[in-house]
Amino acid sequence: METTFEIKKMLNLSSARRIIESGEPVNLSFWKKNGEIVQANGVKCTSSNFENNSFNIIFPESGEIRKIKALLVFNINGEEVIL
């Protein structure tokens, strides 16, 4: 009997911060305060605050800028973020 395991690539929080802060477009999944999941595709980080552990991201289609907490991001470009 052969067993196969799928190994998922996971990012730690510091790697996730580097990817988001790179200024390159990224696809993010994060939770809102009410638990709703937001899929943000092609967003760019405009600024970050290490002390508040947050990012300001801009949505390319609408130009909307949102502040998100780093701890609420659970997926970047299809890779799971672990704390």
Image (cartoon, rainbow, N blue to C red):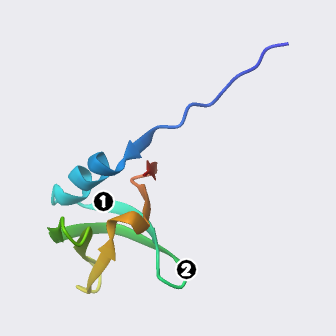
Residue 59 shows which numbered tag? Answer: none
Q: Residue at x 39, y 53 (%)?
A: 77
Residue at the image position 37 percent from the left and 45 percent from the top: 12
Name the side, left or right, on which 18 lies relative to 34: left
Q: Which residue does the numbered mark 2 point to in the structure image? A: 36
What amino acid is labelled 2 in the image?
Answer: Glu
Q: Position of residue 42 (x, y in %)?
A: 31, 66
Q: Residue at x 45, y 49 (%)?
A: 82
Q: Classify residue 46 by image quadrant.
A: bottom left
Task: Point out the image quarter for the N terminus.
Answer: top right
Residue pushed farthest right? Answer: 1
In depth, the one of 71 and 39 nearer the eye is 71
Residue 26: mark in rendering: 1
Instruction: Identify the residue at image location x=33%, y=72%.
Output: 69
- Badge 1 amino acid: Val
* Residue 57 placement (x, y as % from top left): 24, 74
Measure the C-alpha gap from mark 2 to mark 1.
20 Å
